[in-house]
């Protein structure tokens, strides 16, 4: 297996990633245009324009929404297919390794690791392949396009919105590092649970050990939830502060005649369009860091199995290699 996660992504098909990236660029370009059409519809309605002109803008908005929706559908299906191809590759690789090792004695921990990879670990790692390149490109493209449009309309209001996201650049990576440590612990414990199931040993000590592992999984998951949802709470709070800034500055500009009501509405819609891709970008970053941890564990297990088959490592040495 490649040494790092992105090497694995390229192994699964770099030409597919280029095609997905092209769809992502088309999608974020198509997603920005409706904001301008929406602003023109509101200004036309409040400025006394003819109903025919408003109706033309409405149909233009509908056409852009349809284009955006169809492009997103194609992108999601393509990314899903790439992810499933990667999942199948990982699972078949582990199954092939287990078939090759049938003739030699294999420790229960090694079998437990193989079971854990096939049933649980392969799916999130392989699924990430489909979004590894397209997701940050798409969401960053939306942020840049919509942000640039907002700066064009009203620079000071755009600056007030941008300030809202700055604290997140600080606390998101720190909280994600804490989650990564817990994810690594979780995977290790799950592998030991699989090992216990493979052994088929039913004693009071074995049951107590399994119960302790299950309890540790519970505690680890709850710890991850606390950090993850606290992060979400802080991000949502920052978003609401952004709306407060738009209402305050936008209301002042409308009252003093420095801007149109359509501009304020465009900013409200724009913040919603920025909030969603920002959240998706943060989710992608979290998935990246977690998947890197998972991929490293799968790669180490694969390398250990390869070494075991190639060098004829004795049974007693297997746990140290696959742990």
Image (cartoon, grey):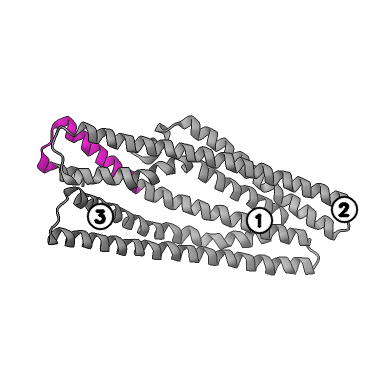
Q: Which residue is mark 2?
A: 51
Question: How many numbered discs sit on the rendered protein?
Answer: 3
Main SS of residues in magenta: helix
Residue under the point 30% across and 42% down: 298
Residue under the point 77% across and 66% down: 254
Q: Nearer the viewer, residue 206 or 136?
A: 206
Across and down, in percent, residue 67 comes to 67, 42
Asked if residue 317 is positioned above or below residue 157 in the image, the reply reads: above
**Range shown magenta:** 293-317
Callout 2 secondary element: helix
Q: Which residue is mark 1?
A: 270
Residue under the point 40% across and 60% down: 175
Q: Which mark, by number, is residue 308?
A: none
Callout 3 secondary element: helix
**In this rendering, the label closer to the viewer, 3 or 1:** 3
* In this picture, residue 282 sits left or right of residue 74: left
Q: Nearer the viewer, residue 164 or 96?
A: 96
* In this picture, residue 78 sits left or right of residue 187: right
Picture quarter containing residue 313?
top left
Residue under the point 43% across and 44% down: 128
Callout 1 secondary element: helix
How far apart are the two marked residues, 2 and 1, measured between alpha carbons? 25 Å
Q: Earlier in the sequence, mark 3 or mark 2?
A: 2
Q: Which residue is mark 3?
A: 189
Q: Earlier in the sequence, mark 3 or mark 1?
A: 3
């Amino acid at each position: 297996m490649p040494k790092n996660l992105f090497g694995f992504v390229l192994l699964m098909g770099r030409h597919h990633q280029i095609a997905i990236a092209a769809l992502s660029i088309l999608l974020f370009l198509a997603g920005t245009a409706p904001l301008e059409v929406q602003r023109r519809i509101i200004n036309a309605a409040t400025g006394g324009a003819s109903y025919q002109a408003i109706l033309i803008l409405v149909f233009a908005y509908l056409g852009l929404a349809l284009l955006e929706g169809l492009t997103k559908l194609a992108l999601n299906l393509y990314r899903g297919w790439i992810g499933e191809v990667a999942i199948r590759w990982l699972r078949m690789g582990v199954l092939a390794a287990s078939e090759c090792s049938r003739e030699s004695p294999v420790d229960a921990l090694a079998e437990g690791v193989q079971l854990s990879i096939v049933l649980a670990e392969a799916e999130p790692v392989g699924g990430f392949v489909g979004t590894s390149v397209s997701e940050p490109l798409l969401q960053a493209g939306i942020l840049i396009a919509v942000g640039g449009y907002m700066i064009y309309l009203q620079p000071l209001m755009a600056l007030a919105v941008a300030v809202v996201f700055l604290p997140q650049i600080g606390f998101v990576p720190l909280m994600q590092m804490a989650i990564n440590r817990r994810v690594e612990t979780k995977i290790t414990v799950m592998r030991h649970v699989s090992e216990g199931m493979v052994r088929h040993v039913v004693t009071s000590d074995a049951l107590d050990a399994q119960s302790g592992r299950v309890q540790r999984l519970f505690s680890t998951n709850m710890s991850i939830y606390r950090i993850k949802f606290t992060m979400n709470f802080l991000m949502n709070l920052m978003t609401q502060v952004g709306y407060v800034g738009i209402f305050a500055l936008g209301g002042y500009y409308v009252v003093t005649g420095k801007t149109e009501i359509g501009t304020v509405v465009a900013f409200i819609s724009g913040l919603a369009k920025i909030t969603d891709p920002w959240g998706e970008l943060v989710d992608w970053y979290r998935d990246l860091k977690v998947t890197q941890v998972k991929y490293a564990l799968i790669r180490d297990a694969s390398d250990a199995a390869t070494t075991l088959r190639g060098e004829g490592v004795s049974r007693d040495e297997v746990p140290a290699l696959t742990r």
